Image (cartoon, grey):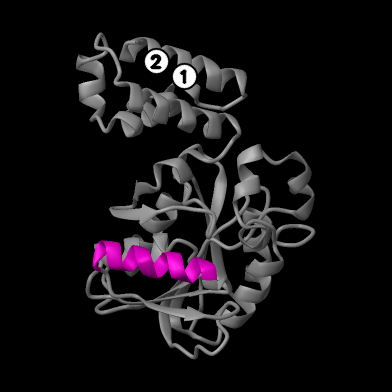
Amino acid sequence: MAVLRDLLRQGAAQLQAAGVPSPEVDARALLVLALNLSPTALLTRGHEPAPADGQARYEALLARRAARVPLQHLLGEVEWGGVRLRTDARALVPRPETEWLLHLALQALAGRHKPRVLDVGTGTGALALGLKAARPDAQVSATDLSEEALSLARENAALNGRDVAFVAGDLLAGLSGPFDLIVSNPPYLPETDAQAAQPEVAFDPPLALYGGPDGLAVARRLAAQAGATLVPGGELLLELDPRNAAPFAAELRAQGWQATTAPDLTDRERFVLAQRLA
């Protein structure tokens, strides 16, 4: 019977051989899940043998991760932006960089009393629920074209006890606002990126990933609709591919928006901050 420390080392080696980008981190997370341990307990009990049923669960999880099933799907739930989110194939796994979009959105809401906020393309509900958790006074709505994604978002709203109005539809269809802030992490990858995508991407809905030939098709449609639903001085915040943030901000300025970009935590220009002028 293998001890925990050996299982961890063997699991990391298996995932590394399968090309998993973070084999040690993933192996540790899966061993903690399989044995129902805390990370601290795994450290302090590394010399102990693993129970046979726990080892079997771990090996099954490792096999799925080696097949490049996303770690978040195997864990079933992640902590993100101050909320707990169930994650599965119904919606895009919320990325760490999008937490900075949440931060920028909260900055934009500073000083606004009972703001009206819309999250377009909500997916798991991450942005909408993170905003509602941080600003309980906000009236938060969220849309998505995918009914499956909305079902997951509603489950996450119930899990966190947050009141968000979820609406099925294409971008702002059927919504008149007015909104103080519209925030979105739209599909933003150029379609040609699909050819070189990591294997994990195959488990994400294509609808949530690709934004036309240059990655900006959805963002352009959203900006065209947003101007009519934002209050004067209201803001549109977008997460885009770093290749496109600056060019799209320039497009918006040419259309009369006040638009700038902001970097992510790795200093790549990823976010567009646009304001509707009075």
Q: Residue 36: x percent and y percent? A: 27, 33
| Residue 149 on the magenta segment | yes
Instruction: Reply above or below: 170 against 266.
Output: below
The residue tagged 2 is 7
- Name the residue: 38% across, 10% down: 6
**Mark 2 nearby-residue class (10 Å; few <14, some 14–19, many ≥20):** many
Q: Quadrant of residue 218?
A: bottom right
Does the image show residue 260? yes
- Name the residue: 61% across, 33% down: 67
Q: Is residue 200 left or right of residue 158?
A: right
Q: Residue 183: x percent and y percent? A: 47, 68
Front residue of 12 and 258 = 12
Callout 1 secondary element: helix
Q: Which residues are magenta?
A: 148-161
Marking on residue 11: 1
| Residue 217 on the magenta segment | no
Q: Residue 146: x percent and y percent? A: 57, 71
Marking on residue 23: none
Front residue of 221 and 67 = 67
